Image (cartoon, helix red, strand yellow):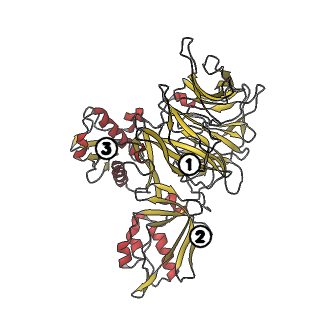
Amino acid sequence: MKARLLAGALATALLVAGCATVPTKGPIRNSSQDAPAPGLGGIGVEARPPRPNAAPQQLVNGFVEAMSDSNAFDVAREYMTPEAGDAWKPESKILVYDQSSSSGIAKEADGKFHLAAPLIATIDGRGSWTPAPPDSSLDFGFDLIKVGDQWRVANPPPGVFLGSNQLVPRLTPYALYFFNPTKHLMVPDPVYLPRNLPSGQAATQLIQELLKGPTTRLGNSVVSNAPPGTTVDVSVPVESGVATVALSGTASSLTDATDREQLAAQITWTLQPITTRVRITVEGAPLLPDRPEELSYTNFTQYDPAVPTGRLKDLYGVRGGRIQRIQGQDDGQTIEAKAIVDSQLYPFRAQSFAVNLRGDTGAVVSTSKAGRPIVVVGRLDAPKNEAPPSVIEADGKVLRPSFDGEDNLWILDRADSAKPRLRVRTADGKVSNVLTNFGANRPVVLRMAPDGVRALLVMERKGVNSVMTASVATSDSKLTLSRFMPLQLPLVDITDASWNNPGILVAGNSPKRDGARPWQVNVDGSQPQVIPGASSSFETIHVASNPNRDTLPAVQDAGKQLHWQGKDLNWVDMAEGPEGQITPVYPG
């Protein structure tokens, strides 16, 4: 697909989970830093009505421009016949197309003016982004007839056409928040709303969508504490910085205090981009009568989907098959790697290493005395009377395991076979199979989000790597990994991917192959952009990241050298030390 890169990053990138080489001790040095990739977003143009006596192509051009303004659909209807205007449903979907020099409106052999361009994605009526399959295209022919003596469009389009350079000026990404099945952590469900909506209107749309339940991206993988049929009374006004969410009486069926608290958490987290002060009522009474009248998402940090903990920014690694704890990357002077000799895992020769989000338990892929692959789970700093580590037998190629926020360890083995196997080991030590079908794709990387619902995968098919997301659901008491969503990124030579804050970090190259770099991508695959400060002095092969806001970015280059990006966006290179290379690992 000839899709252009969409402009606009959603925050500074934070990295953390791949491989790299660091010294055990020694000085650090700065490497070059390039400026962030320039945005390709255009400037939103105010919709204008059709000019008198406009020629057919001028009319079609004006119509396409007018329909991109969600605040002026009535103006766009002026370009159409009355019948077409009445039948047009612009709210049904948005077709995002590549607005490049090769795209445009031209008269075709059938006599119609066609809008023909590569299709990038579809945004449905709820604002959920779905990437278009490879080589998809948009081709729409406009039927023009005269109304009086003026040309008008007679066939209503299937929604709205939006050029890629108008995505950022016209739309803003938000997230609806639902719970994972255990209701311990919230899960973001990304949606788009028109940019520059009044705060009250944006808040109203978000809460209305929240109360409808999750989008098709997550489906039954998540749960909502809003009872079915719950609505919001009329609107969600935002006055003096306070949003008032007046829920219908259906919500009064929540009699358990925890259930009400979790609904309040969903609402306040969903409204976080608009205001941090929210008043929630049910039939005029407070949803949480024992809490302050005004609530904030900060009142519910225990459900934070990023699982904020200081341990997430701790760096670990593997050197010479032994697990290490790496220290000193914060002080700007030296780095020191110390073997975790007290760990139950230290005696095992590690091929890869994973650490849980609390930083007290790890898992290594190793080999048994009989020469078979195994996964060993044990404490990182174990007292002498600790129970022995748990050993899980595996087959074939075993990918680096991944912990979620509830100490579940996700293990994918047989990765080099026609039927890769995914299993999960729960905190109590029980190992269960996860039903899934990778089809013709071969998994190369697996990273579970802390919520334990969302999976991020790098998949190989016919020698080409791509990035997918999937979600875990329970069906007939069995866990299933499904809802695979190819992100269809405009990247080549993809080698790694990892969750970060605020979305996904991908190691890949632009179609021009001007150097592999870390790319920031929204969780739905939209708005890919080279991270701010990405350097052209090295090629990124692996990325290391997790959702913690304070984790230091790290990448591994083609020469197996590690580079950290500081808060000032400058990169720090760690030369290889005399004791060998270290493959770094952050919790997750």
Name the residue that disc number 1 marks.
468
SS for dot 2: loop
Residue 418 locus on image (x, y percent): 62, 45
Q: Residue at x 78, y 26 (%)?
A: 578
- The local crowd at label 1, few if under 14, some if 14 to 19, many if 20 or more residues have their Cα within 10 Å, is many
SS for dot 3: loop
SS for dot 1: strand
Camera-nearest residue between 196 and 57: 57
Q: Which mark is residue 103?
A: 2
Task: Name the image quarter holding residue 277.
Answer: top left
Q: Earlier in the sequence, mark 3 or mark 1?
A: 3
Q: Quadrant of the C terminus?
A: top right
Q: What's the amino acid at mark 3?
A: Ala
Q: Residue at x 37, y 53 (%)?
A: 202
- The local crowd at label 2, few if under 14, some if 14 to 19, many if 20 or more residues have their Cα within 10 Å, is some
Residue 559 locus on image (x, y percent): 76, 39
Q: Give the number of the mark in front: 1 or 2.
A: 1
The CA distance from mark 2 to mark 3 is 44 Å
> Can I make out residue 333 in this image?
no
Q: Residue at x 56, y 47 (%)?
A: 438
> Can I make out residue 545 in this image?
yes
Q: Which mark is residue 226?
A: 3
Q: Earlier in the sequence, mark 1 or mark 2?
A: 2
From the viewer's perspective, is 330 left or right of 231?
right
Q: Disc 3 vs disc 1: Cβ atoms closer than 8 Å?
A: no
Residue 449 locus on image (x, y percent): 51, 39
Q: Give the number of the mark in front: 3 or 1.
A: 1
Q: What's the amino acid at mark 2?
A: Ser
Camera-nearest residue between 551 and 138: 138
Q: Residue furthest bottom?
A: 149
